[in-house]
Image (cartoon, rainbow, N blue to C red):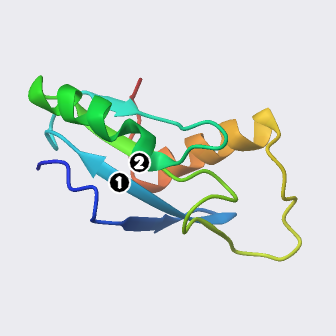
Amino acid sequence: MSLDPDRLLKTTTDVLEVAFLQGGDANGKIALLLHGWPDDATTWTSVASELSKVGVRTIMPWLRGFGQTRFLSPSTHRDGRTEALAQDALDLMDALKIERFS
């Protein structure tokens, strides 16, 4: 599977509908690439391309409050607390049934 930055994928966790890009070898080691502020998932496109060349699968989500990632409930706290972002990342990987990643 090659990186296609125009292909937007989505999955749902308990809190979010997470929009993300992925690329690389579907059977390769997995790298979760998280953007900072004010960037977005596309920040990692060139890095993901290079990782793909060596067989790494990349997952590049839009974090809460960015892009097409959406909150499922209006009562969910809407800030960039580190613990919330970390839990979102773990929840995303659980939703994708990925147990091991860097």
Kindly identify which numbered label has been placed on residue 42: 2
Q: Position of residue 96 (x, y in %)?
A: 40, 53
Within 10 Å of disc 2 (Cα), the crowding (few <14, some 14-19, many 20+) is some
Disc 2 marks a residue whose amino acid type is: Thr
Residue drawn where x is 36% and y is 30% of the image: 31
Residue 85 or residue 40, whichever sits in front: 40
Within 10 Å of disc 1 (Cα), the crowding (few <14, some 14-19, many 20+) is many
| Residue tagged 1 | 21
Q: Indicate the secondary structure of the residue bearing disc 2.
A: helix
Residue 43 lies left or right of residue 55; in this view the side is right
Sequence order check, earlier mark of 1 and 2: 1
Kindly identify which numbered label has been placed on residue 3: none
Residue 98 lies left or right of residue 28; in this view the side is right
Res. 36 image quadrant:
top right
From this view, report whether residue 91 is shown above or below residue 25. Answer: below
Residue 86 or residue 40, whichever sits in front: 40
Q: Position of residue 77 (x, y in %)?
A: 87, 59
Residue drawn where x is 58% and y is 42% of the image: 89
Q: How many marks?
A: 2
Residue 50 lies left or right of residue 74; in this view the side is left
Residue drawn where x is 20% and y is 35% of the image: 49
Q: Are the residues flagged by discs 1 and 2 in contact, CB closer than 8 Å?
A: yes
Residue 45 or residue 84, whichever sits in front: 45
Residue drawn where x is 84% and y is 58% of the image: 78
Res. 26 image quadrant:
top left
Q: Position of residue 99 (x, y in %)?
A: 41, 36
Q: For the C terminus, give its image quadrant.
A: top left
Which-is-in-front pick, marks 1 and 2?
2
Mark 1 and mark 2: Cα distance apart in space: 8 Å
